[in-house]
Amino acid sequence: MVSKPWFVYLVRAANGALYCGISDDPVKRFAKHQSGKGARFFLSSPAVALVYTEACRDKSEALRQERLIKKLRKSAKECLVASAVVAYQAD
């Protein structure tokens, strides 16, 4: 049985901050962040763009990768964003 892939993702807030999370559907999760129901992080500055996604084998791997990314400095996270092929920005 093949498990559904999970993703680690970065979302840019209106103030420029980056939020890291995991999901099995990052685009749907981004929409939730934009609606104000995703994470308290976005209460002070709304989510404006899904700027990075990385596919993982399973939820466990996604959690490990999330922990590693959260330990990075903002400059290193910006390098990940720069390496992203496509950014998703809702209207």
Image (cartoon, grey):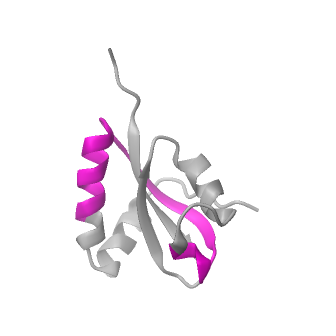
Q: Is residue 61 above or below residue 13?
A: above
Extreme residue in the top direction? 1
Using residue 88 as the reference point, say whether residue 26 is left or right of it: left
For image coordinates 61% across by 47% down, the residue present is 28
Specify the quadrant that holds the N terminus: top left
Image position, residue 2 (x, y; %): 34, 19
For image coordinates 60% across by 77% down, the residue present is 43
Q: Is residue 20 magenta?
A: no
| Numbered circles on residues, count | 0
In the foreground, 54 or 63: 63
Please identify the quarter of the rendering in which residue 77 is found. bottom left
Magenta stretch: give its range: 41-68
Q: Is residue 34 above or below residue 57?
A: below
Q: Is residue 1 above or below residue 52?
A: above
Please identify the quarter of the rendering in which residue 74 is found. bottom left
Please identify the quarter of the rendering in which residue 78 is found. bottom left
In the foreground, 81 or 48: 48
